[in-house]
Image (tube, helix red, strand yellow):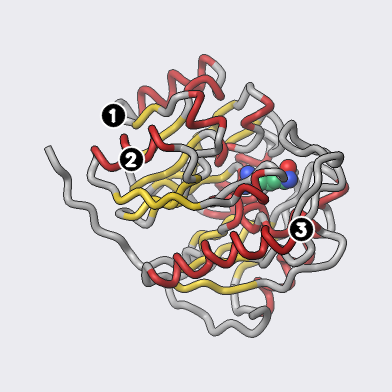
Amino acid sequence: MTVHRTSRPRHYLMCRPSHFTVDYRINPWMDPAKPTDTDLAVLQWERLYALYQELGHTVDLIDPVAGLPDMVYSANGATVLGDRVLMARFRHPERAAEAPAYQAWFEANGYAEVVAPEHVNEGEGDYLVAGSRILAGTGFRTDPASHAEAERVLGAPVVGLTLVDPRFYHLDTALAVLDDDEIMYFPGAFSAESQAVLRELYPDALLATEEDAEVFGLNALSDGRNVLLAEAARGLADRLAERGFTPIGVDLSELFKGGGSVKCCTLELRHAAVPAPVAGG
Ligand code: ARG
């Protein structure tokens, strides 16, 4: 059975990796002893930025800040639902200063309700909007107490999921939303209880292999039809194609050194009306 997939135009926020490097280690992928190539990171990122626009999406940019090498992972900056924005509060001091930078962007860009959180949460790294619900990760970064805060601020029911494998420290490294009621994930990244919750909610989910998860194939972004994902995740790309999606492989090998891929570099702005950008570019 071939399903016909349709894409919906999306609005994203990205941050050019002009200051990207790996000089601290807050996840198992980061190795400060391993050299990074900032120019190559920018080049690879530019390709992703161009791809979104070729696919008809709108991309806003936030200015990168020197000394914040992880700011390129814009998914972590906030979680946006309509006019409501729950800002991030980072677990590690190395990333703490990203939160005010992202908050300033949202305030300058006309978002009505910008909330600085009480609890630690790393934005769309751990909050994934799936149709009318929000899938919420915890275990490594986002405080479980943040889940109730997100439910209150964003006004959608939150389903808490516990991550247990340090390689998959953010929900968006282990699970991707393909469509309102369709997801893909790597079961081994979740506690037994959370695996049961996912099976119950999504009996037809695409289950990724460890091999595809390890190259960050699940750190993917879907517009309902096109699924941009790490090009090394070939098996996953085939499975997506079988389901009628159009997988598009992207090489972000430099940004992988920081422990991120496609989704980490992309924050979705689920705004009713697209505001005119005033900063970045
Ligand atoms: N080095 C960053 C960190 O460990 C990578 C963040 C990746 N972002 C994501 N949405 N998973 O915080």
- From what the image shows, is residue 190 above or below residue 10? above
174 or 162, which is in the foreground?
A: 174
Please provide percent x and percent y for residue 198.
42, 26
Q: Evaluate if marks 1 and 2 touch, with contact meaning CB atoms under 8 Å apart.
A: yes
The residue sitting at 49% across, 52% down in the picture is 250
In this view, which residue lies farthest toward the top?
Answer: 192
- Determine whether the residue tagged by mark 2 lies in a helix, strand or loop: strand
Q: Please count the marks in the image.
A: 3
Q: Amino acid at mark 1?
A: Asp
- Determine whether the residue tagged by mark 3 lies in a helix, strand or loop: loop
Q: Name the N-terminal-most of marks 3 and 1.
A: 3
Q: Is residue 215 left or right of residue 20?
A: left
The answer to which image quadrant residue 223 occupies is bottom left
User: Which numbered marker is on residue 182?
Assistant: 2
Disc 3 from disc 1: Cα separation: 38 Å
The answer to which image quadrant residue 162 occupies is top right
